[in-house]
Amino acid sequence: MKTPDVSAQTAETEFRECVGWFGLSVSCSLSEPWLFLVGVTAVAGLIWHYSKDLPEYSQLQDYEPPVMTRVHAADGALLGEYSKERRLYLPIQAVPNW
């Protein structure tokens, strides 16, 4: 009869303790520094990848979205609307609170 390998059982127990919410727990990442570093590097890489195409903050301050051009008659009647995109400017104060 073959005796069970104690080191294999210990490794399996440690692995089960590490696997938790999102696949890792704090105790695992603290006991395995390389695993923690891999996770931090992966998160930093994702943040860098998705943030490199974002505009600068100064561009967002002066953003003016394209809006429709409306042509009115002398009496105020709407004659036509011209635009590439059908957008209306709506200030944030006009948006209702939920």
Image (spheres, rainbow, N blue to C red):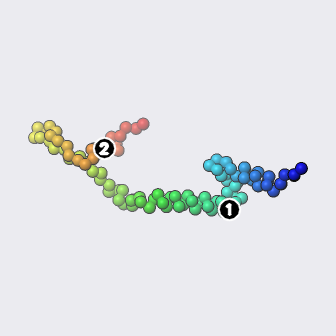
Looking at the rendered structure, the kind of residue marked 2 is: Leu
Mark 2, residues whose alpha carbon is within 10 Å: few (<14), some, or many (≥20)?
few
Q: Which residue appears at 41% of the width and 60% of the height?
A: 53
Q: Position of residue 67 (x, y in %)?
A: 26, 48
Q: Position of residue 84 (x, y in %)?
A: 25, 48
> Front-most of 79 and 12?
12
Position of 67 compared to 75: left or right?
right
* Cα separation between marks 1 and 2: 51 Å
* Residue bearing the label numbered 1: 33
Position of 21 compared to 55: left or right?
right
* Residue bearing the label numbered 2: 90
- Residue 80's place in the image compared with 64, above or below, is above
Q: Position of residue 98 (x, y in %)?
A: 42, 36
- Residue 49's place in the image compared with 21, above or below, is below
Outermost residue toward the left in this view = 74
Q: Which residue appears at 60% of the width and 58% of the height?
A: 39
Looking at the rendered structure, the kind of residue marked 1 is: Pro
**What label sits on residue 24 in the rendered view?**
none
Q: Quadrant of residue 44?
A: bottom right
